[in-house]
Structures are given as C-alpha cells and as structure tokens.
Image (cartoon, rainbow, N blue to C red):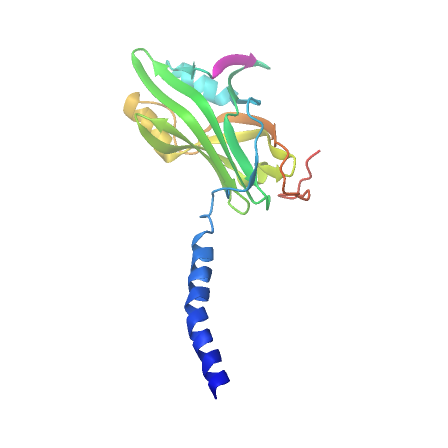
Amino acid sequence: MKTSFVRLCALVTVAPALLVSQSATSDAVPPRGTVPAVSLPLRTGTPWTLCLTDASQRALSDAGMELQAVAPVVLVTENGHRCLRWTVDGGGVDNELSAATMDAAGGFALVRGDRRAEFTDLHGTYTIGDDRAHASTVHHGDRIDTLTTPGNDVVISASGVDIHDAPSLLTQAAAAAVTADIPNSPLRLDDHLFDVDLRVGVLPAAVPVSPRVVAGRERT
C-alpha cells in the first residue's frame, strides 16, 4: 500500500509539469509566414532587380510619372528596361525548406512634378503552400503590403531562393497609397508593375539540410 501511495503522489506531482512543458512547446512554434530562429541565413550583399515592364513604363510615361530609386537602391537599364537594383541585407530559409524571408534597404519612388509616392525598407516573405509571396515596404511611416509574386514562381531549396523573371504585382494598399500621393495615378490592384529577378544563396549552417524540390521545379 505504501508503495502504491508513493507512486500516486509522484504522478500527481509530475503531471502538471508535463502539461506546462507541452504548452510551452506549442507556444514556441513560430506563426505561419515567419522563419524559425534556427535557419539558413541568406548571403547578404547579393544583388537582385525589379524591372518595369513595357506596359507599366508606357502607363507611367502617359501619366507624366517616373520611377526613381531611393539609396542604396540604384536605377539601371537592363535589356532596354528601367530597373531597380537592390542588394540583400538579411533574411533566411528555414531548415524545413518551407518558408523564407528577405530584407533589403532603400526603396523606390514614383514621382510626378512635386508629388512623390515613396516605398522603402522592403521585407519579403513566402511560405510553401501560399498562393503568393509578399513584399511589404514603409510608406509615410507605416508598413504596408506593396508587391506580390505568384507562389509557383518562387523556388526554395537548400541552395537558397530563386525567383527568375517573375511578375511583381501591385497590391490594393500600394495602389491606394500612390493615388493618395499622386492623384489620377494609372496604377491599380494587381497591375504587373515589375518583373523580379532574384537568385540568392545561403550561408553554411551547422544543421544539415537535404535538398528538396519545391513547386515542381528543381533548382539548377
């Protein structure tokens, strides 16, 4: 009887601790769309571009608007297109190869006369299974969803993140922000404003990760 009583007391003591441990483990799971602390960091300093499409360049010109870069982003010409050249400043790929983030300083502005709509401090996120990748920027002190890219154009692998010549579409929030700053702007929701070209590798990590094919495409 004494042995049974001691065992019962031990179970009563241990059970709450187990419940607390399980709850803490559950709470530690990062929310969807973020990269856990243990991740493969992106190679900072890697250049990438957002290039105006022919249609968006015509629309801006017809409206008397022009694209400008906000340092350290620079404006360049590639294959006849006006492009914003950024560099990767941070971000990473999680060890499950299911999500990625990216940060890039600087930004771009759309300008007409003395009116200006400026978007800076880009933060990109993508989680496997989502239909779009999202890039937010800061506009007048507020971070807003600015550009999206179809999810099936984003490849995440143990080598890094690859988005090749994919459409970058304007969000409703960004289109409204431009119109507020520049009345009668021709830009609308889901306008194919840019083409994005990005291939950024990851730094070696202590935790081994196996290569994986994502979205039906194998990275070469």
Percent across and percent down for residue 34 are 47, 42
Q: Is residue 161 left or right of residue 23?
A: right
Judged from this view, the residue extending furthest toward the top is: 113
Q: Quadrant of the C terminus?
A: top right
Say above or below: 25 vs 62.
below
For the residue pair 94 and 168, the one nearer the viewer reads as 94
Q: Dividing the picture into quarters, in which one does residue 203 lie?
A: top right
Say whether residue 163 is magenta: no
The image quarter containing residue 105 is top left
| Predominant secondary structure, magenta span | strand
Q: Position of residue 58 (x, y in %)?
A: 46, 17
Q: Is residue 21 visible?
A: yes
Q: How many marks?
A: 0
Residue 183 appears in the figure: no
Q: Is residue 172 above or below residue 84?
A: below
Q: Residue at x 30, y 27 (%)?
A: 141
**Span colored in magenta:** 73-77
Task: State the residue in front, 9 or 104.
Answer: 9
